[in-house]
Amino acid sequence: MSQSYQTIMVAVDGSTGAELALHKAIHVAKRNKARLYIVHVIDTRALHNVVAFDASVYESLEREAKELLITYKRTAEEQGLEQVDILIEFGNPKTMLATDIPQQIEADLILLGATGLNAFERLLIGSSSEYIMRHACVDLLIVRDSTKTF
């Protein structure tokens, strides 16, 4: 049995792990002749107190995310992908990436980097990758950095 994917979502945050996931997603999308969605979720949970004092924080984060995603989209197109979309959302990245966005875009595969938070942050709030792995409604590929030794 051969599995093919039509709509692939890759979650990015600017980290090295996310860039590795992006490059893997580009290759998988090319092999499957699939549409690629490059997605970034701005975590509003951490911003509630800050935004009360400075609403421009949201605008700044959105502008930075858009610049990053446009660069990533250009990279995907330069590598031969024709169907590339970018999406920026505000909310809880864990739930948005596990269920909300994949349902919205009808994704059938999610790719994300294995790392992004440091050990202390994972202890406090949990790994996003782990949460998404447990709650994703579609296939999930966690991309690891093969150059790191553990």
Image: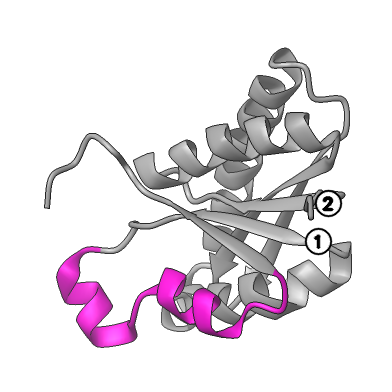
Identify the residue at image location x=36%, y=48%: 144
Residue at the disc numbered 2: 7
Identify the residue at image location x=65%, y=59%: 110
Picture layout, residue 25 above or below residue 55 = above
Looking at the rendered structure, the kind of residue marked 2 is Thr
Q: Quadrant of residue 75?
A: top right
> For the magenta stretch, what is the residue range?
118-138
> Considering depth in this image, is 95 or 28 the residue closer to the camera?
28
> Badge 2: few (under 14), some or many (20 or more) residues near its Cα, within 10 Å?
many
Look at the numbered discs 2 and 1 and tell me whether their residues touch, using CB distance below 8 Å: yes
Quarter of the image that includes the N terminus: bottom right
Residue 72 percent location from the top left of the image: 62, 31
* Left or right of residue 2: residue 44: left
Residue 73 percent location from the top left of the image: 70, 30
Identify the residue at image location x=86%, y=62%: 105
* Residue 107 badge: 1
Looking at the rendered structure, the kind of residue marked 1 is Ala
Majority SS type along the magenta span: helix
> Considering depth in this image, is 13 or 62 the residue closer to the camera?
13
Q: Is residue 108 visible to the viewer in this orientation of the structure?
A: yes
Question: How many angstroms separate mark 2 from mark 1 (CA)?
Answer: 5 Å
> Badge 1: few (under 14), some or many (20 or more) residues near its Cα, within 10 Å?
many
